[in-house]
């Protein structure tokens, strides 16, 4: 079940600085920072994503802000140092879980909230796929996308179990 996570811990031990630098760079394009324009979708993003962004900003004294454009905001760039300090403070096990969660969800902010117990795996999954799930409600779902999300949902549950 979590064998790949045990291997990820070994990778972290060997490449810790490189992994942290990747995550810091990845934070500039965090999923939670790029919002839609549809009123209903934005309302859901406000309800689900805003509390996570606020919590992450408070937790590491950062200034992550969202945008409705595709431009990376300067605040995301300046928050990189605070994120790096946070990532440096994680154990190898936590960093391995964080890295796997961040890649699965396309969000270091969600990974941070999950690794620190602010949200559980299911809440993280729902937040990470908020846009896709909203689109499914509107236009139906794609079988391949459902399979992909199921794999990711299971991996997030594995990560949660691994951290306990």
Image (spheres, rainbow, N blue to C red):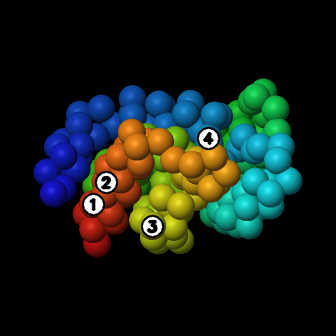
Whichever of callouts 3 and 1 sits on the residue coming sooner in the sequence is 3
Residue marked by disc 3: 122
Q: Secondary structure at mark 4?
A: loop
Q: Earlier in the sequence, mark 4 or mark 3?
A: 4
110 above or below 161? above
- Circles 2 and 4 in contact, beta carbons < 8 Å: no
Residue shown at 58%/58% (left/top)? Answer: 127
Among the 4 quarters of the image, the one containing residue 35: top right
N-term mark: 2 or 4: 4
> Answer yes or no: do the residues labelled 2 and 3 have beta carbons within 8 Å?
no
For marks 3 and 1, give the CA distance.
11 Å
The percent position of residue 19, horizontal first and vertical second, equals 39, 34
**Label 2 crowding class (10 Å Cα cut-off): few <14, some 14-19, many 20+?**
many
Please name whichever residue, 14 or 49, is drawn nearer the observer in this view of the structure.
Answer: 49
Q: Which residue corresponds to mark 2?
A: 155
The kind of secondary structure element at disc 2 is helix
- The residue carrying pointer 3 sits among few (fewer than 14), some (14 to 19) or many (20 or more) residues within 10 Å by Cα, namely some
Q: Quadrant of the C terminus?
A: bottom left
For label 3, the SS is: helix
Residue under label 1, please give it: 158
Tell us which disc is closer to us: 4 or 3.
3
In the image shown, does 79 or 54 lie closer to the viewer? 54
Please provide percent x and percent y for residue 158.
27, 60
Q: Given this view, does label 3 or label 1 mark the residue nearer the observer?
A: 3
Q: Residue at x 45, y 67 (%)?
A: 122
Percent position of residue 16, x then y = 34, 37
Q: Earlier in the sequence, mark 2 or mark 3?
A: 3
* Dot 1 and dot 2 residues touching (CB under 8 Å): yes
> Marks 4 and 3, how far apart in space?
19 Å
Q: Which mark is residue 30?
A: 4
Assign the N terminus to one quadrant of the image. bottom left
């Amino acid at each position: 079940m979590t064998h790949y996570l045990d291997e990820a811990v070994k990778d972290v031990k060997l490449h810790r600085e490189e992994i942290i630098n990747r995550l810091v760079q990845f934070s500039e394009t965090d999923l939670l920072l790029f919002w839609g324009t549809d009123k209903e979708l934005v309302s859901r993003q406000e309800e689900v994503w805003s509390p996570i962004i606020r919590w992450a900003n408070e937790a590491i004294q950062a200034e992550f802000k969202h945008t409705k454009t595709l431009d990376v905001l300067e605040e995301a760039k300046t928050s990189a140092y605070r994120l790096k300090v946070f990532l440096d403070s994680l154990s190898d096990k936590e960093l391995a879980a964080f890295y796997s969660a961040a890649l699965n969800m396309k969000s270091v902010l969600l990974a941070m909230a999950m690794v620190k117990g602010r949200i559980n795996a299911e809440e993280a999954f729902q937040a990470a796929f908020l846009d896709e799930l909203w689109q499914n409600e509107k236009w139906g779902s794609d079988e391949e996308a459902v399979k992909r999300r199921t794999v990711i949902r299971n991996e997030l549950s594995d990560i949660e179990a691994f951290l306990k």
